[in-house]
Amino acid sequence: MRVFTPNEVTVNSANKYLAILVAAKYSRVLNEFPRDRSKSGEKKLTTRALEELSAGAIEYRVVPRRRSE
């Protein structure tokens, strides 16, 4: 299992907390796609998401929450 440092994930994001939230949401999106279960050496989805985020392959934008009135 690969260990990601805070410096690695903050290269393409504002801070480490936002980076983890983006990677978690992206791994949920990846989970919806069918995967080839025959591969035994397949990486975990969270590891794949963090690798892509660190490489700058994920584009995201922060949408402010609306206040309910």
Image (cartoon, helix red, strand yellow):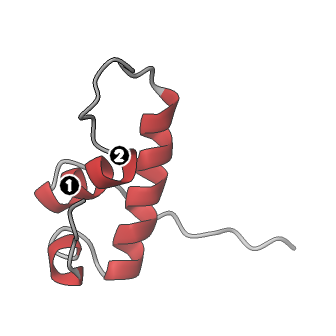
Q: Position of residue 60 (x, y in %)?
A: 34, 55
Q: Residue at x 45, y 66 (%)?
A: 21
**In screen coordinates, is 62 left or right of 56?**
right
Residue 37 visible here: yes
At label 1, the amino acid type is Glu
Mark 2 or mark 1, which is nearer the start of the sequence? 2
How many residues crowd around disc 1 within 10 Å: few (fewer than 14), some, or many (20 or more)? Answer: some
Figure disc tally: 2
Q: Secondary structure at mark 1?
A: helix
Q: What number is the disc on residue 44?
A: 2
Task: Work out whether 28 lies above or below 31.
Answer: below
The image quadrant where one finds the N terminus is: bottom left
Residue 59 visible here: no
Q: CA distance from mark 1 to mark 2?
A: 11 Å
Q: What number is the disc on residue 51?
A: 1
Q: Residue furthest right?
A: 69
* Quadrant housing residue 12: bottom left
At label 2, the amino acid type is Lys
